[in-house]
Image (cartoon, grey):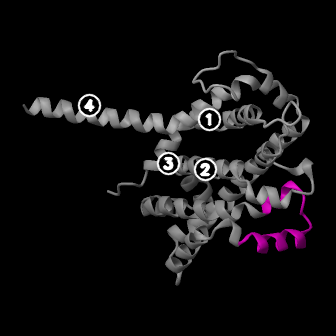
Amino acid sequence: MARLGEMLRRGLFYLLVIVIAIYALFPFYWALTTSFKTENELFGRAAYLPQTWTLKNYQYVLRDGGFLVALRNSAFVAGTTAVLSLMVGAFAAYALGRLRFRGRMLLLYLVLSMTMFPAISILSGLYTIVREFGVFGTPFALILTYPVFTLPFTVWVLTSFFRGLPAEIEQAAIVDGASPFQTFRLILLPLLAPALVTTGLLSFVSSWNEYLFALNFTITNPDAQTVTVAIAQFSGIDAMQEPVAEIMAAAMIVTIPLVVLVLIFQNRIAAGLTAGAVKG
């Protein structure tokens, strides 16, 4: 009887996992199949698989010079933002996680509170800053503003990891004659590799997918727009057409780099998300 109950619980657990997986993956599956459908089939009877597989939508997207420029801009902006967030966030997290000074916890919670503001509420202020710096209508406007939401997350996560490192490691380095910067760069940072990969990748994904700032700060210069803005402005292959299939094809092309990055760094991402969860 106990064995039957255990089998029933396991069966229900796996059934729940399958339902959640289908719920999470079905939109991606539908977008993928839609990207291979023809125009007539797309607005005809709904089908789970294309009756006629076509690459015309992908050819249209890849032949669009504006989309390729936007793809390059997204890679530049997201990569630069992730690197800057890690560089600045690592130093800030080290100070908040390893040093003791008055107001440390207040400052840490202040950093966390920065992530609670809706993007639209700070848009006007950032718009003024971007105009004052003279980078409006360029990718540098996004590099200047994206750390507003990537940096607080990076600092908060890395701070918890710095706290979890044994103090004996730092003390041993000081006894061996290492300077504080050498200890930070040569000893502590390598130990935080999983956390750096995790936070860096999440910062990259957030910047890659961002739309509101990209639309408002590059609206006057199509050559500076990112893929999220370029996809929203697709006009389609034919006149008076709703470019659903082309948008889905572009979405698949934009998603591929993120999937590849996650597959490459999946082990480090898992380690970074779980390390420090249990303190001994």
Camera-near label (3 vs 2) is 2
Residue 38 in view of the camera:
no
For marks 2 and 1, the one nearer the N-term is 2
Q: Nearer the viewer, mark 1 or mark 3?
A: 1
Taking the image as shown, residue 90 lies to the left or right of residue 142, namely: left
Q: Which of marks 4 and 1 is nearer the N terminus?
A: 4
Whether tag 3 and tag 2 are in contact, CB under 8 A, the answer is no
Which circle's residue, 1 or 3, is located before the other in the chain?
1
Mark 2 or 4: the one toward you: 4
Note whether 88 is above or below 250 in the view shown: below
What number is the disc on residue 272? Answer: 3
Q: Name the residue under label 4.
A: 11
Q: Whole-percent x and y of residue 151?
A: 65, 62
Vertically, is 183 above or below 8? below
Query: In the rendered image, which residue does mark 1 sit on?
Result: 259
Identify which amino acid the numbered label 4 is placed on.
Gly
Task: Give the vertical position of 182 relative to 108 (above or below).
Answer: above
Amino acid type shown at disc 1: Val
Q: Can residue 209 be seen in this view?
A: yes
* Residue at image coords 71%, 37%: 251
